[in-house]
């Protein structure tokens, strides 16, 4: 049987480096992470799901060709092919070879739509988002420290985390965990004038920045068939 070889060559070395950094962050939260890749028209979209946040993370990169493919691969194997700093073959003028396809996890079959997004008002500035996150982490630590010895269990901490990270920002319906994910994955900056936007399409919400997007189904849309495990929120 002939195995199809899918080449991967970026339009600019910086694109490969940014993608490598994104994959490294995903693997920090899940060493067995898989990513779904969709390429076409000179653009590669990479979808991942860090389990701690219950969201989809999306990173795009410009490619040197317009080959089209749609495949799910191991994030670790893809990072190995690119090199830890993105300086592998795909960034050096020759095509890197994509790793072999893997069976996609449940989330990989429930992706947000490609089009039909509408901008929504009400999203705080990046500086204000950062302040909200800082306050949320401080609240978690305070409530965690206040637990009586007999209740200092993972389950109790998960309840505290769900209470905090499921809160929405004003009337935007965007849960705080989406902002936390954006910051943890390197998508969010607090510099003045940094562009962030909130978009909606059907039941989907999307927090978009120049470095990537966080997408999830809103409160009215549920999480479909996704299997969700509540975990203690990261506090770094």
Image (cartoon, rainbow, N blue to C red):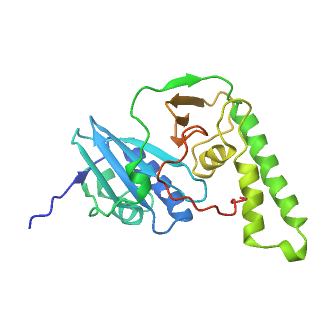
* Horizontal and vertical percent position of residue 177: 66, 48
Residue at 52% from the left image edge and 65% from the top image edge: 30
Where is residue 154, by image quadrant? Answer: bottom right
Residue at 37% from the left image edge and 52% from the top image edge: 36
Residue at 55% from the left image edge and 35% from the top image edge: 205
Report whether 193 appears left or right of 146: left
* Horizontal and vertical percent position of residue 194: 63, 31
Where is residue 106, by image quadrant? Answer: bottom left
Report whether 197 appears left or right of 17: right
Say if residue 219 shows up in the picture. yes
Image vertical order of residue 211 relative to residue 117, above or below? below
Residue at 78% from the left image edge and 58% from the top image edge: 160
* Horizontal and vertical percent position of residue 31: 49, 69
Report whether 188 appears left or right of 37: right
Where is residue 72, by image quadrant? Answer: bottom left
Q: Nearer the viewer, residue 93 or 5?
A: 5
Q: Nearer the viewer, residue 68 or 55?
A: 55
* Horizontal and vertical percent position of residue 139: 84, 53
Q: Residue furthest left?
A: 1
Check the picture and name the quadrant holding the C terminus. bottom right
Q: Residue furthest bottom?
A: 150
Number of marks in picture: 0
Check the picture and name the quadrant holding the N terminus. bottom left
Say if residue 92 shows up in the picture. no
Image vertical order of residue 122 relative to residue 79, above or below? above
Q: Nearer the viewer, residue 120 or 225?
A: 225
Report whether 208 appears left or right of 95: right
């Amino acid at each position: 049987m002939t195995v199809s070889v899918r080449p991967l060559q970026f339009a600019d070395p910086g694109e490969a480096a940014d993608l490598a950094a994104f994959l490294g962050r995903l693997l920090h939260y899940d060493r067995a992470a898989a990513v779904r890749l969709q390429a076409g028209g000179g653009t590669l979209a990479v979808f991942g799901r860090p389990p701690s946040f219950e969201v989809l993370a999306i990173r795009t990169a410009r490619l040197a060709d317009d080959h089209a493919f749609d495949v799910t691969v191991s994030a670790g194997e893809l990072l190995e092919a690119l090199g830890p700093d993105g300086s592998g073959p795909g960034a050096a003028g020759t095509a890197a070879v994509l790793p072999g396809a893997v069976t996609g996890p449940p989330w990989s079959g429930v992706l947000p739509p490609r089009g039909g997004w509408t901008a929504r008002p009400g999203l705080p500035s990046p500086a204000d988002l950062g302040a909200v996150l800082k306050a949320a982490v401080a609240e978690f630590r305070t409530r965690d420290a206040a637990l009586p010895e007999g209740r200092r269990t993972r389950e109790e901490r998960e309840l505290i985390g769900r209470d905090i990270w499921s809160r929405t920002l004003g009337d935007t319906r965007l849960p705080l965990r989406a902002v936390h994910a954006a910051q943890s994955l390197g998508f969010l900056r607090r510099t003045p004038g940094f562009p962030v936007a909130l978009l909606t399409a059907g039941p989907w919400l999307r927090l978009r920045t120049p470095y990537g997007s966080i997408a999830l189904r809103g409160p009215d849309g549920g999480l479909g068939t996704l299997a969700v495990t509540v975990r203690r929120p990261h506090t770094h």
